[in-house]
Amino acid sequence: MSEYNPMAVAQSQFNMAAEILDLDEAMREFLRWPMREFSMRLPVRMDDGSVEVFQGFRVQFNDARGPTKGGIRFHPTETLDTIRALGMWMTWKCAVMDLPLGGAKGGVICNPKAMSARELEALCRAYIREVASIIGPGRDVPAPDVYTTPQMMAWMMDEYAKISGWSHLGVITGKPLSVGGSQGRGDATARGGWYTVREAARELSIDLSEATVAVQGYGNAGSYAATLGRQLFGCKVVAVSDTGGAIINEDGLDPQAVLRHKTETGSVAGFPEAEAIANGELLELDVDVLWPAALENAIDKDNAERIRAKIVAEAANGPTSLEADEILYRNGIHVIPDLLCNAGGVTVSYFEMVQNACLEQWSAECVYERLDAKMTRAYHSVLQLAKREDIDMRTAACMVAIQRVAQAVRVRGWI
Ligand code: GLU
């Protein structure tokens, strides 16, 4: 594959799992593609008075198990194929967690770092105006993803309420607490990921209180992965990175001090109590746990042989290419696949939907406990299958998920 295409990767992963599951051809043909996709032009008045027209997407991949669920990304290099792949992964993610939800994903081609808060609000509202007729608490429920925030979710929820005339809190998740957000949603992706790492470490006899950690990407998932690693398990976070650069301190970084530095300067680079390393080097460090927490395709055929971490915890969606997957598996590296590792985000989103539907407010402890139970159960169901079939964790996770989705498709009488 010369040009990396996440949809081709997602479909190949699907094909592998479908083959082992011996799915019939019609089912494969149905599950290999989104059920529905939408594409829209979004004119937005910019601060200088000009109008910029943005391209947006929403892909509802599969709703056999329930309303579709998945985030909205704002990124300059967004493509429809990426959103399709992410929609497919959301479908498997919700199914592997056994949530009564299907999968979707949305995106807008834009550079949010170069936009003002007012421009971003206008773009969020324009997006919702276009998708208002196809989303809803029982239909399709968006959430934050790369470069979208709880504030943006609040604007989107508000726009939907204005259009529909009803205060449907559950139309969007990942909202601020003051407008129906859930306790524990902010760090849910990283926290859920750490619960799976805890189980993996037990399996591999790694003592997390002495473990070293490297984190690639310092957004929501990455910064919380670093902070919680230290807070929950006493891990030593030795290196972190973002698009501005990578830093290392063998004695351990203070993740919250690094975050403050990033908030002030825009990057983790230049943090005083650390040395600079190349971004690529971070991935190849000899650490116990490596968190790819940025974008797709961070670990590919060119660097996979040099990955030395014992556990790769995929906080990002699709960070490992197909070729890299094979290499990591051959080299005995325990990969906790994205579908499972980062499913804490959508799981607490699901808790948020439940709370919104019942007008309930759960405590943080209640959310953590339920999240832990769900992550631990899902991790072990995947691990068990991987061991039984002698396959990698990703293929096993896909198999658990695809089997559940195919079952729902059959029971509904679609195929
Ligand atoms: N964007 C997150 C993901 O990729 C969360 C989705 C959600 O909460 O619906 O899993």
Image: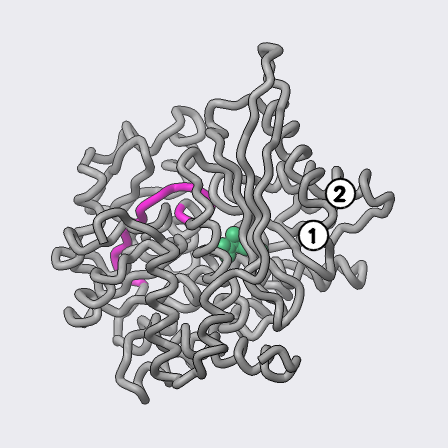
Seen at 21% across and 57% down, the residue is: 287
Q: Is residue 339 above or below residue 406?
A: above
User: Does residue 184 sit above or below 263 in this rendering?
Assistant: below
Amino acid of disc 1 = Ile
Q: Which mark is residue 252?
A: none
* Magenta-tinted stretch: 209-222
**CB contact under 8 Å: marks 1 and 2:** yes
User: Label 1 crowding class (10 Å Cα cut-off): few <14, some 14-19, many 20+?
Assistant: many
Q: Position of residue 145 (x, y in %)?
A: 51, 46
Disc 1, SS: loop
Is 217 inside the magenta-drawn segment? yes
Q: Which residue is mark 1?
A: 135
Left or right placement of residue 70 versus residue 29 in this view: right
314 and 135: which one is in front?
A: 135
| Residue type marked 2 | Tyr
Question: Which residue is labeled 2 in the image?
Answer: 160
Regarding residue 250, the answer to whether it shows in the image is: yes
Residue 194 in sight here: no
Residue at the image position 40 percent from the left and 37 percent from the top? 77
From the viewer's side, name the closer residue of 96 and 67: 67
Please give the name of the residue rendered at 30% of the width and 43% of the height, measured from the top-left corner: 240
